[in-house]
Image (cartoon, helix red, strand yellow):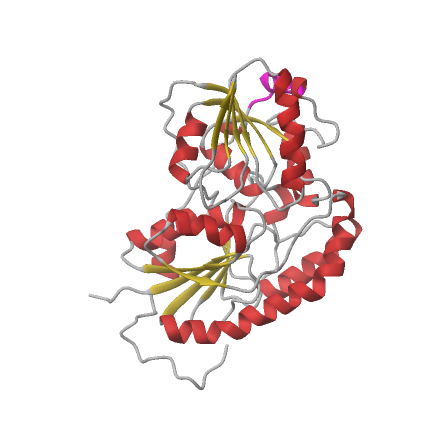
Amino acid sequence: MQKSKNILVAPLNWGLGHATRCIPIINAIIENGDRPIIASDGQALALLRKEFEKEAFIELPSYGIEYGEDGQNLKLKMLKDSPKIWMAIRNEHKMLHSIILKHQIAGIISDNRLGLYSNIVPSVIITHQLQVLSGNTTWLSTQLHLHYIKKYDYCWIPDVEGLESLSGKLSQNDDYEIEKVYLGPLSRFKNTDNYQKKYDLMILLSGPEPQRNILEKKLLEEVKRYTGEVLFIAGKIEKEQRFLKKGLLTYYNYLSTDGLQKALDRSEVILCRSGYTTIMDLQKMNKKAFFIPTPGQFEQEYLAQLLDQKGIVPQASQIDFKIEMLSQIINYKGLGSIQIFTTSLSSVLRETFSNVNENSEPIPNSLST
């Protein structure tokens, strides 16, 4: 019988989507009898500490990704911050060998952290961005991303290939140098289809600051004109959970996965960002929604427009949104109308790391990543 393996799981700290879509992967590692070693920084690390209190954690260098208050200048801000981002990538790569040695890592799963590739143990990068949209610099941003993806042994894509793709052109790329594995959509939730509605509207916020906070303030004003029961999840991972009930509004700073599962079950429609992880969750939960993409984030704007044009989910810009626009939802099919497969994560994990055994010879100190 093989000894259990230590698998490093490291999501990017950019909003909470990368961390939350790693939750089913971490659960599958545990179900396989192996041990996850969880590495990230900031809010992503805080969230996973709350979800997996008994596991081991490592803090990695922060990429320091933030939005300006004017979302339309995001590309310029990212360009300005690029030296800081590249330094964080280099630093996490320098840390990797010592992490492998200290924790006897048998394999690496990185969700969009670009420096965690290795020539010692198998390394996987999870991304749905085989095309990185950035306006008139899309070709350049895509090539930069592919440069790092190709350093990994495998690229796991949380989508399906071809016309049924949930993320459209983002996850499609015919570059033969990339060892692609299409997993189907990843979600930490289960579709129970067995609930009694409690909330007419659930507002689910996420994403980097300050845009998350800007939208929170706007929507707290907008819901004053809403006549139904509202559940407001602010998406702020803080030390203590905060709860407020005022009239028809129920407010939480954050909810755990179990809490969000119950909240989604009991909510009629969802108002949220059009982040890809959120889209996968709502598709899994068979929900109708309304999207407000993060200003200046080309990917979210593309996904919102794509699903709007297909008659699946309506959307509006952050500056234009009014609560009365939610009446449009009835004319759209909802994300539950999209039926696509998901693969067995346990099987993919076993296949990817099948040739790595902790009973093998220890990793020598002279090797480098």
Q: Which residues are magenta?
A: 325-333
Q: Is residue 197 above or below residue 21?
A: above
> Which quadrant of the view contains residue 217?
top right
Q: Is residue 188 above or below residue 146?
A: above
Q: Left or right: where does residue 143 sit relative to residue 76? A: left
User: Where does residue 246 sit, x and y in percent of width and height?
Assistant: 52, 21
The N terminus lies in quadrant: bottom left
Residue located at (31% from left, 65% from top): 5
Residue located at (45% from left, 37% from top): 255
> Which quadrant of the view contains residue 114?
bottom right
Is 327 part of what is drawn in magenta? yes
User: Where does residue 201 sit, x and y in percent of width and height?
Assistant: 53, 22
Q: Could you tell me how many numbered marks the image carries?
A: 0
Residue located at (42% from left, 72% from top): 100
The kind of secondary structure the magenta stretch mainly shows is helix
Looking at the image, the residue that sits furthest to the bottom is 366
Is 223 part of what is drawn in magenta? no
User: Where does residue 176 sit, x and y in percent of width and height?
Assistant: 58, 62
Residue located at (47% from left, 44% from top): 184
Q: Could one spot residue 203 in this view of the protein?
A: yes
**Depth order, front residue of 98/303:** 98
Q: Left or right: where does residue 222 sit relative to residue 288? A: right
> Which quadrant of the view contains residue 4?
bottom left
Looking at the image, the residue that sits furthest to the left is 1
**Depth order, front residue of 283/188:** 188
User: Where does residue 291 sit, x and y in percent of width and height?
Assistant: 62, 31
